[in-house]
Image (spheres, rainbow, N blue to C red):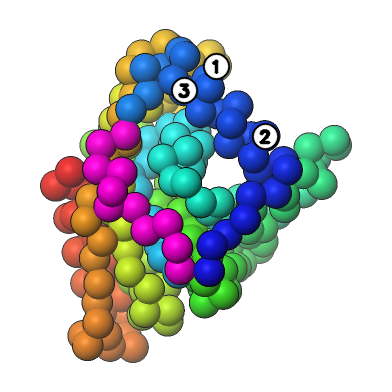
Amino acid sequence: MQQRMTVWYWFGYSLSKAIAKTFFHYRVIGAENMIEEGPCIIAANHCSNLDPPLVGIACKRAIHYLGKKSLLDWPVLGPIFPQLNVIPVDQKNAARSALMGAIRVVKSGGAVLIFPEGSRSPDENLQPAQSGIGMIVTKTGAPVVPVRVSGSFQAFPRGRAVPRLVAVKVTIGAPIRFEGSVIEDRAFYQKASDRIMDAVASL
């Protein structure tokens, strides 16, 4: 089903797109590969806090994001995060909380952004994929859209307080499907995750 944008999501989406195009010469390559309806998993590399909005504005639909549950306790902004499709992740059991939240969204027909590496790269190089995204694929049967973000590390790496105004690009690859080859075990989860990360690396 088509995910509708809430008022707050539309506002954040529009503002992020305006800032990206104005200050970061933002462009999208392969937009025709994005799955704009029905369940899907968007898998992207991760080296900057800019990555979630940069990937989000490459989609015409509203997508979901994983975020710390503690974000909901922030004054003023806390109540807005659910309107921005943030899936709260309980840090006491982060892995399970993230996986269950993502699976729930995809099974309901939504799109969720997952970073297979698990955390931001410290040096822009791709890190090994964690097995979590492979489990989400197995549990949902949803197609995966590989995405490569370029330039975000130069713009806003870990530890930098103010972004540099450099060009950023989002490249979207052809969807990956695992139909007829899904196995419910950790070895398969990792194999699927590695295949997805290879697709991201090839972009």
Q: Tag 2: residue type?
A: Phe
First-in-chain label (2 vs 3)? 2
Q: Is residue 107 above or below residue 131?
A: below
Report the disc number at residue 20: 3
Is residue 159 among the parts visible in the rendering? no
**Coordinates of residue 81 in the picture (x, y in percent):** 72, 46
Instruction: Identify the residue at image location x=35%, y=48%.
Output: 44
First-in-chain label (2 vs 1)? 2
**Coordinates of residue 88 in the picture (x, y in percent):** 67, 58
Distance of mark 2 from mark 3, alpha carbons?
A: 14 Å
Instruction: Identify the residue at image location x=53%, y=69%.
Output: 1
Q: Tag 1: residue type?
A: Ala
Report the disc number at residue 11: 2
The residue positioned farthest toward the right in the image shown: 75
Q: Is residue 29 above or below residue 156?
A: below
170 falls in the magenta region:
no
Q: Residues within 10 Å of mark 3 (few under 14, many from 20)?
A: many
Q: Tag 3: residue type?
A: Ala
* Range covered by the magenta-colored residues: 28-38
Instruction: Identify the residue at image location x=64%, y=34%.
Output: 12
Q: Helix, strand, or loop for circle 3?
A: helix
Q: Is residue 197 left or right of residue 135?
A: left
Q: Helix, strand, or loop for circle 1?
A: loop
Distance of mark 3 from mark 1, alpha carbons?
A: 17 Å
Q: Which residue is mark 1?
A: 161
